[in-house]
Image: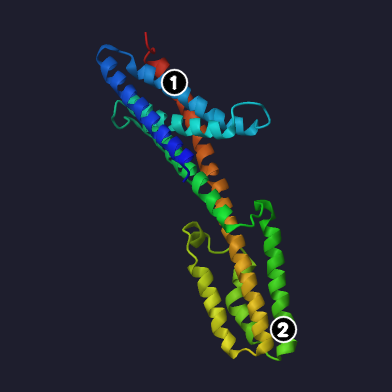
Amino acid sequence: MTGRRIFKSIAYAASLLAAAVAAVWEYRRAQPGHPHMAYLTGWLLLALVLVLTAYNARKKLAFLPLISSQAWLRAHSWLGMFAGLVFLMHLRWRLPAGGFEGVLAALFVGVTLSGIAGSWLSRVLPRRLTSAGGEVPYERIPVVLRALRERAEALVVAGIPAAGTASLADFYAARLSGFFAGPANLGPHLFGSSHALNSLLADLGGVERYLNADEKKTALELADLVREKDALDLHRSMQLVLKGWLFVHIPLTYGMLVFIAVHVVLVYSFSGGAR
């Protein structure tokens, strides 16, 4: 981590801590004499949620000369963490009472946790993709996968007449056909494990003792294809998670907005609101 990034991280944490301390101090100071603190924290929380939701619109309007996407992301993360504190103030540091409020609180927690997870993934996974090299656009992965499978199958089939045996073809059918047939090893790639790849290569190496010279040459080429396929699976796994977490975060966000709208209507309908 560079000095500039360390400074930004420290500044981010320090500013968030200072804002949190100031907010809690002001809340505790004003609460005893303010009969409508729940309304104030509620409207502040709604304003924060609307600003946070605007980040999705900002991404769709990237062509406009607005604040940079990176600055928006930092602000989105900062405001999201601060909104969590305001949420606790709005609940008066207690668990919600009632089923509707419980669902709304659960949605807010889900949005917050998925946002924290997405923020972490967006920082970590792109670096892993960069270190792996040779990034393939997600939409082209099925095409590249099919081409690798066809190359592997053609390599094995072409080697049968020259070798006079089907030893390597039998190994491919038993151990590699499923590997090349589709995406594999999602979990190991997410956790940075190369055990699955090493196991395949070890099994392929174990077969080499039974192969003649021509088959050994084919086995080496096949091992290279296995590594290419594993690298492709790595890119697919990383990109799938980077895209997939939004399908949790965004629906939860809009579901929460619907519940917030109903919550506001109910509060002002049955309690008369702040007077």
Across and down, in percent, residue 29 comes to: 26, 17
Q: Kindly give the residue lying farthest to the front in the view shown.
A: 3
Rendering coords of residue 35 (x, y %):
30, 13
Q: Which percent across, then down, holds residue 153?
A: 70, 75
Neighbours of disc 2 within 10 Å: few (<14), some (14-19), many (20+): some
Q: CA distance from mark 2 to mark 1?
A: 72 Å
Q: Residue at x 48, y 41 (%)?
A: 119
What is the residue that sits farthest to the top in this orientation?
275
Residue sticking out furthest to the left: 32
Quarter of the image where one finds residue 40: top left
206 to the left or right of 213: left
Q: Secondary structure at mark 2?
A: helix
* Res 103 seen here: no
Q: Reply above or below: 106 against 235.
A: above
Circle 2 residue: 159
Q: Residue at x 52, y 44 (%)?
A: 122
Residue in the picture at 65% in, 32% down: 62
Check disc 1 and give the amino acid type.
Val
The spot of residue 217 in percent (x, y) is 67, 82
Q: Which mark is residue 264?
A: 1
Image height of 41 relative to 211, above or below: above
Residue 258 left/right relative to 94: right
SS of the residue at dot 1? helix
Q: Earlier in the sequence, mark 2 or mark 1?
A: 2
Asked whether the beta carbons under mark 2 and mark 1 sit within 8 Å of each other, the answer is no
